[in-house]
Image (cartoon, grey):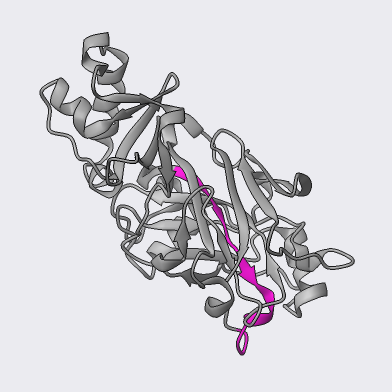
Amino acid sequence: MRFVTYRTVETEPRLGLVHQGLVIDVEYFGAAIGRDLPGAMLDFIDLGPVAVRFLKEAVANATTADLVGTALPEGNVILLAPIPRPRKNIFGIGLNYTEHVAESARALDTSHELPQQPVIFSKPPTAVVAWNDPIRHNAKVTQQLDWETELAVVIGSTAKNVAEADALDHVFGYTVINDVSARDCRRAGQWIVSKGQDSFAPMGPAIVTADEIGDPHDLTLRTRVNGVEKQNGNTRFMLFNVNQLIADISSVMTLEPGDIIATGTPAGVGAGRNPQEFMWPGDIVECEIEKIGTLRNPIVAV
């Protein structure tokens, strides 16, 4: 299933399910069939896998009458980030594709050695913006604004000391994140200022449930800037796959429903190109992942 957070000109943010060109309001649909369902993404994730299974079956069996007053055409809604305000910082994974390790070593003075453990940083909730929201370019702060298309994992159930073999059982679904990075804002090797500024975590357009994605380790990722392709990779080339990332993080920190892991980016970032390329006001960046969709954002001066 494909879940979105949406609003209209008349509503606050609402939880929606995309189905056959419609956005079904989950809370209103629940009321129509006599069930109490939440109106926010995090509240729905908290219900666990049983809620996903129930809603999938209920929508499949819905009558036209069930959908009257509960659904709108996709074109009539405004998409927000699927989780507009994460409860915690997003877990970012750095240097998780072999060729990106090499280009980072050339351009950013990082180690040319492959990481022996996942490289973990974070992006605060205030970095999250939606499809078509502006990415803020503050020329007083950065002259090296860069793109990174990443598969993001949304945790569905509490995970602590999880074995790799069981890790995917804790996944609710997947979305797209652009791990926007100001390459000239690293501080003594620390990345949070470079990657955690306001608007530096565009997310969306939807969360697609794990059952719809299947194997998360065979998905094509692409980045386009002003329509020109810059990145073209596949999740099969991760150094540490989703199972390993969940197992590693959960060995030291409890992962909770709604937590987000951005799993790293393939080669082709602007800093790694010759000559280097960066994003500037007026540019449009698109981050696309197979089976999930395309995240589109303009770069705007502030």
Q: Residue furthest front?
A: 9
Which residue corresponds to the image point at 59% horizontal and 42% vertical from the top-left?
217
The C terminus sits in image quarter: bottom right
Figure check: 255 above or below 29: below
Which residue corresponds to the image point at 71% horizontal and 73% vertical from the top-left?
144
Q: Residue furthest bottom?
A: 188
Left or right of 88 on screen, residue 262: right
Left or right of 48 on screen, residue 163: right
Q: Is residue 90 visible?
A: yes
The N terminus sits in image quarter: top left
Q: Where's residue 29, x and y in %?
A: 22, 25
Left or right of 193 on screen, residue 104: right
The residue nearer to you, when weighing 298 against 182, is 298
Left or right of 122 on screen, residue 270: right
Figure check: 6 above or below 258: above
Q: Quadrant of residue 292?
A: top right
Q: Where's residue 62, x and y in %?
A: 26, 13
Which residue corresponds to the image point at 83% horizontal and 68% vertical from the top-left?
276
Question: Would residue 142 be counted in the magenta stretch?
Answer: no
Q: Where's residue 83, x and y in %?
A: 37, 51
Which range of residues does the magenta coloring cover?
Answer: 174-189
The residue nearer to you, when weighing 153 against 33, is 33
